[in-house]
Image (cartoon, rainbow, N blue to C red):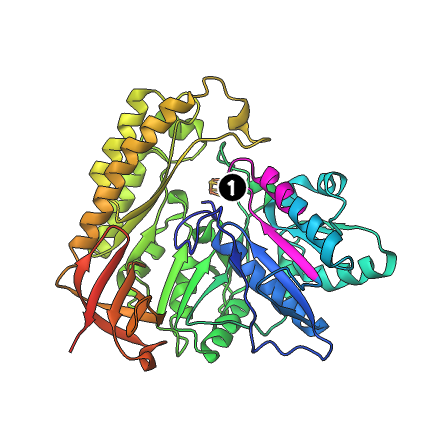
Amino acid sequence: MSPHEKNVARDVDTPAIIAAKPDVIAPANTKKVFIKTYGCQMNVYDSERMADVLAPIGYAPVDTPDHADLVILNTCHIREKAAEKVYSELGRIRKHKEQNKPDMKVAVAGCVAQAEGAEIMRRAPVVDMVLGPQTYHKLPEMIAKVHRSSGEVLETEFDTIEKFDQLPKHRSVKGFSAFLTVQEGCDKFCTFCVVPYTRGAEVSRNVQQIVDEARGLAAQGVREITLIGQNVNAYIAEGPDGTQWGLGQLIRHVALIGGIDRIRFTTSHPRDMDDELIRVIGEEPKLMPYLHLPIQSGSNKILRAMNRDHTYDHYKQLIAKIRTARPEIALSGDFIVGFPGETELDFEETMRCVEEIGYASSFSFKYSIRPGTPGASMHRQVDEDVKQDRLVRLQELLYTQQEAHNKSLIGKTLSVLVEGAGRKGGQLFGRSPYLTGTHFDGPENLIGQIVDVTITEAGRNSLVGVLAR
Ligand code: SF4
């Protein structure tokens, strides 16, 4: 499933900034790089890795473009008008460059770069480099070329395995929770989605590389790892025993690493949810009881039109098996309303699906056309006001379920990974096993620890509690 999904630290339209990392060992004469990240967890991971690639050639990350020698926009193509938003941002960067920093270099990375390619350079001459998601290990070489020739450089080849082979072994991270890419790309070709065109075919990293990276993260104090992939449960690679390992076996292996106390994975596709993975969900205590499993629609007719390759019944049976394996699991889903041809009856089937399944969290969107995808040329596009009305009705139900799930936790004691200080003095902030933000009073020396918190209040988006005695 697509990378715009769960565990989202931020909304697609809200850029994240890879802030300065004091532990990056950079040569003297340090140059500054500002990386603005849009979209999913994989882009967050990619931006961190771009910072790692640039550190040995003297670039330190900064959190504003003001004095940056290099600005990278790590773009996302999931939302509507994504490319137009990038061009607007490039207009602002051009002004800043002309007025304040004429020697600044500009790169566009990520999925818009992959989709638009040379068109970006044609429309935005301020851009020196365009690099697709599979080529960021080539950044130093591209920067050298730009400096040598004062020309533009375009790299949008697909070679995921080469990228992972060439990335620096050391990963510099901040905090106690980290993403780790285990799989990239998608072969599913859902008719609404650009990912198969921007990220390429499904490719899995080898087990040893993943374990080494996870060990490196643990050595830096990371306690929680989220294994990520566009279709993370399509993971398949040769294990140390010479057999093919799926995600379930990989999770069991990563769980053996000392220091890693919590594991999550996202995003999964119902078609790839195999029995071994369901067994691991039931058996592995380090795996958090939270699963993001998108369905998109409750109507089999629409699922077929979306090319989802599963029916509602198949999904429902999967959920039943997963709940039998791990009764306390919290479910999260993705929904698209107003896909071409969706009638009121189809929409009601989505509502019925939500009522029957019950979600602890969710992501719901109105269908919007992605140029180049089959959905874009389908007949019977749904009127905007109908989509809006359906979205409001769907979200009302989903949000009620989310709040009910959170309120059901009042009085329970949950383990919380403390990420930092809360907004109020003396308050700490962390994540529950269900990924819900949790606030409670406690001393700062608990930051980075996993503590027990008894939940006393619950809203739709967060929990409040007290340290358990
Ligand atoms: S094509 Fe479908 S399965 Fe693949 S990333 Fe897009 S939404 Fe997910």
Q: Is residue 304 rendered to the left or right of residue 169?
A: left
Q: Is residue 155 rendered to the left or right of residue 391?
A: right
**Amino acid type, mark 1:** Ile
User: Is residue 298 depicted above or below 384 in this figure?
Assistant: below
Q: Is residue 164 visible to us here?
A: no
Is the CB–ligand 1 distance for label 1 below 8 Å?
no
Q: Which residues are magenta?
A: 70-90
Number of numbered tags placed on the structure image: 1
Q: x, y (%) of residue 66?
A: 64, 61
Quarter residue 447 falls in = bottom left
Q: Residue at x 54, y 32 (%)?
A: 370
Q: Residue at x 35, y 71 (%)?
A: 421
Quarter residue 29 falls in = bottom right
Residue identified by numbered label 1: 78
Q: x, y (%) of residue 391?
A: 34, 32
Q: Is residue 101 rendered to the left or right of residue 237?
A: right
Q: Is residue 312 visible to us here?
A: yes
Residue 63: say if magenta: no
User: Is residue 113 depicted above or below 241 in this figure?
Assistant: above
Residue 89: say if magenta: yes
- Disc 1 is placed on an element classified as loop
Quarter residue 65 falls in = bottom right
Q: x, y (%) of residue 52?
A: 62, 69
Q: Is residue 105 rendered to the left or right of residue 369?
A: right
